[in-house]
Image (cartoon, rainbow, N blue to C red):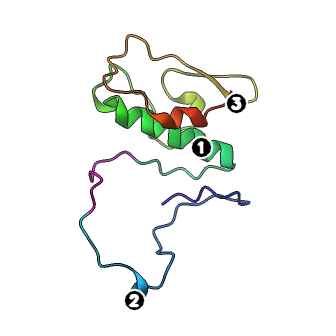
Amino acid sequence: TVSMQPTISPSVSRQPLQSPSKLPSQQPSRTPSHYPTVSMQPTTLYEVQQRVALVALYGATNGDEWESSTNWLSDAPMCEWYGLDCNNDDDMIAIYLGWNSLHGSIPSELGLLTN
């Protein structure tokens, strides 16, 4: 899970929030095991939100079948992901993915992007 609470250094954790004895019985996950993930550690809450939104966009629009998905879901800075435009401060300011064979629905997570 990704912690969305403001912290000094957001992190990804697979540790349960409760002791194992108090957790409900383990049931099969309804999330596909091939759901995309990002391994790079974001440094701000907004960067976490940006990555969550972009991973959701990739997953919802069949990113594996895009014409170009260079650096998507990689450890490369987001400004190096195909179709993303950044300003001089490395803030993502635009997404250009027209004519890139996106198929699917635009995910609600894109609402996390404010720039």
Q: Secondary structure at mark 3?
A: loop
**Mark 1 or 2 closer to N-term?**
2
Residue under circle 1?
A: 49
The 10 Å Cα crowd at callout 1, few under 14, some 14 to 19, many 20 or more, is: many
Name the image quarter holding residue 60. Answer: top left
Name the image quarter holding residue 23. Answer: bottom left
Q: Position of residue 59 (x, y in %)?
A: 36, 37
- Front-most of residues 32 and 77: 32
Q: Residue at left 30%, top 30%?
A: 62
Name the image quarter holding residue 85. Answer: top right
Residue under circle 3?
A: 90
Q: Position of residue 51 (x, y in %)?
A: 54, 41
Is 34 in the magenta?
Answer: yes
Residue 55 sits above or below residue 42 on the image = above
Residue 16 sits above or below residue 34 on the image = below
Residue under circle 2?
A: 21
Report the span colored magenta.
29-36
Residue at far bottom of view: 21
- Front-most of residues 98 and 114: 114
The answer to whether 62 appears left or right of 81 in the picture is left
**Mark 1 or 3 closer to N-term?**
1
Is 70 in the magenta?
Answer: no
Principal SS element in the magenta part?
loop
Q: Identify residue type, mark 3.
A: Asp
Residues marked 2 and 3 touching at CB (< 8 Å): no
Q: Identify residue type, mark 2.
A: Ser
Residue at far top of view: 99
- Front-most of residues 22 and 69: 22
**Front of the two marks 1 and 2:** 2
